[in-house]
Image (cartoon, rainbow, N blue to C red):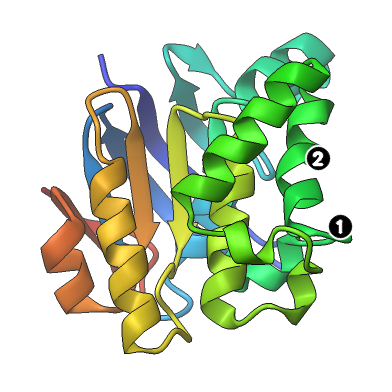
Amino acid sequence: MSLIELSDVKFSYPDGTPALGGISVSFDLGKCYCLQGPNGCGKSTLFRILNGLSFPDSGTYRFDGTEITAGYLKNKNNAHAFHRQIGFIFQNSEVQLFTSSVEDEIAFGLYQMGLSDGVVSERVEKYITLLNLQDFRNRAPWVLSGGEKKRCALAAVLAMEPRVLILDEPIAMLDDEGQEWITRFLEGLKSPDRLIIIATHNHAFADRIGDVRISMTKDHVISGNG
């Protein structure tokens, strides 16, 4: 069974504008999926649904066999268990960075999970090292370069050790060096126990990192899966 399954998912904005026109797709652990399509095709809406921030008007979204609905996530235990399994990196990493230092940024989500001081300290050190942030640990995230902000956001999300990592245009607005660093890092994250879903307009990046290519059309549907 796939970890994530969407069946005929449709979604429209309040004014009736369609965003998803009947999406059926599955995502398996151990694979990296690259989602491509023109601006306005519904990629961002799909990501909101995958993260439990929006819900289908019709159709079903199942995560590990459980249907994810607004009602299901109203239960705090359900919401906590679901959200800790999915990590989301925004295209503009700056919007998800808000603490006074890099190490505080990584620690914040861990304390929200209720982890002990000792575990938080261990994970902060682990992911500062993994993302090569040692020289910036005491700096405010908003003074970092674009690539450094991206690495800080990745560290904060990965420290919570989610099963699913969703990234929106992870190499956009980075210079060649930053793009190569992020690409190599993401290649190293691929494992049998992790699902990675990436939206990207960069075909060379998708060819290099993706196991499965998924194309969305301007009609808000998927034209292929695999």
**In front: 195, or 22?**
195
Label 2: few (<14), some (14–19) or many (≥20) C-alpha neighbours in 10 Å: some
Location of residue 119 with respect to 50 vertically, above or below: above
Disc 2: which residue? 108
Q: Is residue 207 left or right of residue 189?
A: left
Q: Amino acid at mark 1?
A: Thr
Residue 41 quadrant: bottom left
Q: Amino acid at mark 2?
A: Phe
Q: Secondary structure at mark 1?
A: loop
Question: In the rendering, at what x and y percent does residue 101 appear?
Answer: 81, 59
Label 1: few (<14), some (14–19) or many (≥20) C-alpha neighbours in 10 Å: some
> Residue at point 51% right, 75% down?
147
Q: Is residue 24 left or right of residue 159?
A: left
Give the CA distance from mark 2 to mark 1: 8 Å
**In front: 100, or 109?**
100
Location of residue 171 with respect to 111 vertically, above or below: below
> Residue at point 80% right, 15% down?
116
Q: How many marks?
A: 2
Residue 87 visible here: no
Residue 205 visible here: yes
* Quarter occupied by the N terminus: top left
**In front: 12, or 63?**
63
Question: In the rendering, at what x and y percent does residue 195 appear?
Answer: 33, 35
Q: Is residue 206 left or right of residue 45?
A: left
Q: Secondary structure at mark 2?
A: helix
Question: In the rendering, at what x and y percent does residue 142 appear?
Answer: 77, 75
**In front: 139, or 163?**
139
Give yes or no for contact between labels 2 and 1 (Cβ–Cβ under 8 Å).
Answer: yes
> Residue at point 53% right, 18% down?
67
Disc 1: which residue? 99
Question: In the rendering, at what x and y percent does residue 173 appear?
Answer: 48, 86
